[in-house]
Amino acid sequence: MSDYSFVGKKMPRVDSRAKVTGQAAFTADLYLPRMLVGKILRSPLPHARIVHIDTSRAKRLPGVKAVVTGHDTLQRKWGVFRYTLDQMFLPTDKVRYIGEDVAGVAAVDEDTALEALSLIRVEYEELPAVFDPMEAILPDAPLIHEDFPQNINIHVPISVGDVEKGFRESYYVREDTFTAAEDSYFQAEPYAVVANFDMAGNLEMWMPNAGPHMKAKPLSNALGIPLNKVRVRKIAIGGAFGGRSEIAPGDFVCALLSQKTRRPVKIVYSREENSIATRQGHALITTIKTGVDRRGRVIARDITCYMDGGAYSSTGPIATSVPFLCMEQAYKMDHVRYNGYRIYTNKPIRGMIRIHGRGFACGVDIQLDRIAEHLGIDPVQMRLINAREAGEYTNTKSYVASCAMKETIEKAAARAGWKDKYGKLPPYRGIGIGCNSVQTGFPMGIRGGSQAFIKFNEDGGVTVISGVVDNGQGNDHMLVQIAAEELGIHPDDVQLITADTEVTPSDPGAYSQVSTFIGGQAVKNAAADAREKLFAVAADVLECRVDDLVARDRMIFVEGSPEAGIPVKKVVRISLSRGKSISGEGEYWPKVDPKREWIKNPFGQMCGAFSFGTTIAEVEVDPETGKVTVLEVTAAQDVGFAINPLVLEGQFQGSVAMGGQGGMLTEYHTWHEGRTLNPTQLDYGVPLACDMPKINTIIVESHDPDGPYGAKEAGMSIAMSAAQAYSAAISNAIGVYMEDFPITPDKILAAIRKKHQEK
């Protein structure tokens, strides 16, 4: 590892200066000549038939350049999968949640656009609505989509082994039900989109996105224009967390308005719109039944999970599967059965989120603690007994090539002082542990691989061209580090062109935790290709073998003889003088089973690698107010190899903030008849820097055989394990195992009162 010049070293990110000085431009900062302001009319009702829309008065308003409804579209339905085509971006039949897009306007300024919205008259026939997933599946519940009986959007059944036999052979069996409310992404940057349709029929788009190619294709389909005429451009992005991968109705409305006017249009969401008109996290109801032997080894597990999916499918098959997959990756078991149901309700659409499945994951770990208490086993030991190890297969037949989960448990426990604290803390002080695993990717079909290009400039600098997206997690710097390392140049010598569908090749995007594993590997391979050509010229000049050459510090030299070297830029110029430019091309496709599918065949290799994380939290609870003070958090994750430890420490801290401090203490939505009552940051409790506890970060390296330098996903396993650790620590502090998340002061006080009443 010490031979590396840049990878494995702590380095400030290449985009840091622009962001801290405010020079980074986000979509809302973009201004184009003759740009119009776009606004969207939204449904005030949760479920209603659209009888008639009258836009005539809005169209006559001076300054209004276009008004669009569903009748101005091709009326094509969209879905992430062919079997989930259920959403029209501007519906013509009925609305299915409060806030759904109904019409769009483009005007010369914001005041005119808002006035135009007020002039649109929509006649609705209100329909019965349903907001609870358990009520939605009842036989007499109103159907939100007529072709989905009982409002069951997705059912994922997985069964391995003989679960009933496993329970019969178990020494101890228990069953518990856990619930969790909806939550939001609450990115720092509210959603904004700019569309520019030129006279030649070419569409340029700027918006926050986790994968430009995943936006371009749906836009092409919905607008009925060739894909080569849709260009999704890179721009700074203020966070994603799983919420900016799919096309949004606002993207389509903005593009349609620009198509109508042949002028640039910009739509900027309000903070309220950013809550109700983009994706949210699912609410969950999860029942877990687990059987163990005398020493605590899990023999059988049966899980039924109901997810409130909102009005449309979104990433339904993925969302319904991932909580189970994370659990089976982290923990071994002989027999397992899972039934996941995603249910339609008349609420905003739900999608994947960084702490997706908190009610599921926290339930698994809380139940492990309960079982451990019954058996007299320490919770840390309970997890070590059941922890995944390298060389094993998951229940759904994915091979785990690298795994240091036990090491994360042991190192976190040692750093947190578990042995000295567990069971020995004063009243209302508690400590808890959580463990989780996350996939480094999942099946994405033809978008599953990444390609990259590198070209040398005559001064020895290079340009890297890659489809990888940076949503704030440091992907741009990762690509720079890899290119500089492989080519023996400095990071300052590397220029990036990324995430532009017109210029950059296909890439999965920063959506399935694969940017380093797949996109980074593609850049590494492209750099190796360019280096081979560079070394061929250098070997001729230095009169040596190619295999004897190394590149470092902008020089190429015979290994062991740095004094007999030649500058990289000189080699490039020599090659140009011979009529050959130096460039490289590389690609990487993960070794996944192409037959694996979320519902029809959830078996086979699902991704190239898995990350494993452990978090331990220590808390203090005020029994008079229910307020939780988090004293210290220790987070350890197996990242394969830390390409930039400084960035990983930041990712760990952000994961603790989102999964633990926010996800388990303050972040949830409240509702009234399908209306979000806390859509803004005034009422939705996103943690601030001043709320955060001391965080100890531990990077564990297992050196994955397929990852670049051994690297794989880093950060996501901490988000979920932090939620688990917080819930376990609070339960430990008050002596009551909590089952409803997040754990707010009112729930804590109710649990304490009930505990005292039962004594």
Image (tube, rainbow, N blue to C red):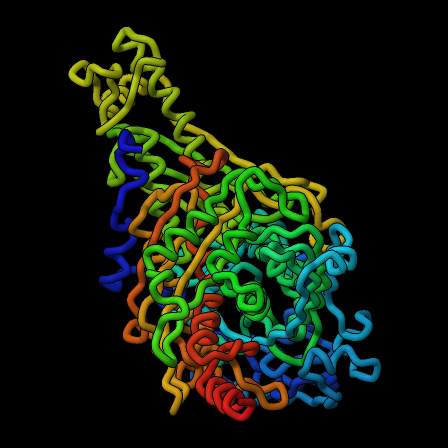
Q: Position of residue 355 (x, y in %)?
A: 50, 65
Residue at 42% x, 55% y is 715
Residue 425, quarter of picture: bottom left
- Which residue is depicted at the point 34% across and 21% down? 534
Q: Residue extending furthest top?
A: 543
Q: Residue 456: x percent and y percent? A: 33, 30
Q: Residue at x 69, y 78 (%)?
A: 133
State whether residue 465 appears in this view: yes
Count the numbered circles shown: 0
Residue 77 visible (yes or no):
no
Question: Residue 32: x, y in percent?
Answer: 39, 64
Does 226 sit above or below residue 46? above
Instruction: Check the image and report above or below for 513 versus 79.
Output: above
Q: Is 540 displayed left or right of 135 in the figure?
A: left
In this view, the residue in front, 148 or 507, is 148
**In the shown orientation, is residue 372 left or right of residue 291?**
left
The residue located at (53%, 89%) in the rendering is: 759
Name the outermost residue toward the left: 563
Nearest the viewer among 169 and 521 is 169
Determine the image quadrant of residue 123.
Answer: bottom right
Q: Nearer the viewer, residue 447 or 299?
A: 299
Position of residue 174 measured from the top left corner of the image (x, y, whole percent): 66, 69
Position of the N terminus, as image quadrant, is top left
Q: Is residue 670 left or right of residue 529?
A: right
Q: Is residue 280 above or below residue 419?
A: below
